[in-house]
Image (tube, rainbow, N blue to C red):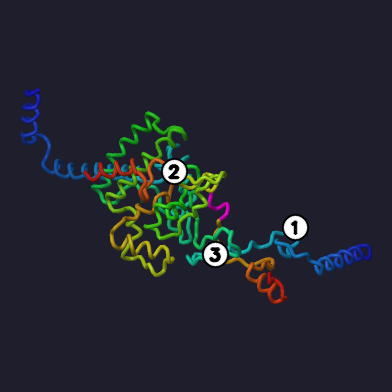
Amino acid sequence: MRRMISRFWRVMSKPATHLSLGFLTIGGFVMGVIFWGGFNTALELTNTEEFCVSCHEMRDNVFVELQTTVHYSNASGVRATCPDCHVPHAWSSKIARKMAASKEVYGKIFGTISTREKFEAKRLELASHEWARFEANDSLECRNCHSSESMDITLQSKRASEAHERFLLTGEKTCISCHKGIAHELPDMSEAAWHGKGDPKLVQSYLSSVAD
Amino acid sequence: MKKLLIPAIIALSVSAAFAENQVATLRGTAPLDENPDAPVIPKVVNSDIRQVRNYPEQPPVIPHKIDGYQIDIKYNQCLTCHARSAIEVSQAPMVSITHFMDRDGQFLASVSPRRFFCTQCHVPQSEARIELKNTFVDVDEVLDYIQSQGGGSE
């Protein structure tokens, strides 16, 4: 092993004898552009609604539920697709999320949620992951479109403006604290009440695991 | 020509007679073989102002939009604000204690399953045109009427 490494080092540290410096620099640059472009193109391909709903797990469960909500069809015709909420926009966070998503590939291969029943059984756990992520990043994906600075609460209904004034503008809560279940159906919440003095077992445990 | 004219006149006069005796229906005056324009969907009242109940037992109407609220075996989104434990945060009226009663009159810890589906009794209101005039009078008006007729002394 040591010999192999030292041989590799000897070859790599020697100047090139047959290839010109121009070929190596320009060739390296061109190859870099091709590799980097290809990588990002492939990354963006996995960042589309089309890609997400190409699996029946997404198409038959969460995508169907999204279609009845205001994030899919609304008066102004602006639509939020899967990655708008579920993948961060900033590059480093996006790569981190994509690496975490390799777990989802594992789930796909082993059929973790391959039937409706399996999906329903795991719904609370999966939803809790997303709620914890939103709580931890202060609902960043919501705020990519809905910012509290550009929100005119006088145009909102009495109920909404009062709630936003008390909880959003003071920073006491973040979007997801109240707006759960707006794009997909809520899981069976009898095990994880998030309001009042109920025992928010799962949600709490995920939150504390994120905070640590 | 005459052969054609007579049935044509009959057809015209019959249709004219029908047009005069139009029965008012929800589909309007459009002929049966035509689809009338659909009326505009009325706006839902979203004022958050509590409305008067017409009689004490009336389930209060919902003074806000409830579009897309999930009320099923998994969750009841109304209770996010109206549950006993939620009203401090939401400042919404709590679900009445009568909703905690089972059919034997026993109070349960939370909303009884038979009272779980809010929209069976509580509904939002819309700014719809009233198709038929309502002649309902509430009990105060009935009492006023009885008194004005010199009755109701006992």
Task: State whether residue B11 is above or below residue A125.
Answer: below
In this rendering, do the residues under marks 3 and 1 share a single chain? yes
| Badge number at residue B43 | 3
Q: Earlier in the sequence, mark 3 or mark 1?
A: 1
The residue at 82%/67% (across/down) is B21
| Label 1: element kind | loop
* Residue numbers of the magenta segment: B117-121
User: Residue A89: image x %, image y %?
Assistant: 29, 51
- CA gap, disc 3 and disc 2: 29 Å
In the depicted structure, whether residue B128 falls above or below residue A41: below
Badge 3 element: loop
Residue A62's image quarter?
top left
Q: Residues within 10 Å of mark 3 (few under 14, many from 20)?
A: few
What's the chain of the residue with tag 3?
A: B
Residue farthest front in this picture: B154
**Left or right relative to B57: residue A89:** left
Magenta-colored stretch includes residue B101:
no
Q: Amino acid at mark 1?
A: Asp
In the rendered structure, which amino acid carries the disc numbered 2?
Val
Q: Estimate the x, y position of residue A6 in percent, counting from the top left.
A: 6, 27
- Tell us which disc is closer to us: 3 or 1: 3
Mark 2, other Cα within 10 Å: few <14 / some 14–19 / many ≥20: some
Q: Which residue is mark 1?
A: B33
Q: Nearer the viewer, residue B28 or B34?
A: B28
Check the residue under mark 1 and report the chain it is in: B
Residue B43 sits in quarter:
bottom right
* Residue extending furthest toward the right: B2
The residue tagged 2 is A62
Residue B119 included in the magenta stretch of the image: yes
Q: Which of these two is toward me, A58 or A199?
A: A199
Q: Residue at x 10, y 22 (%)?
A: A1
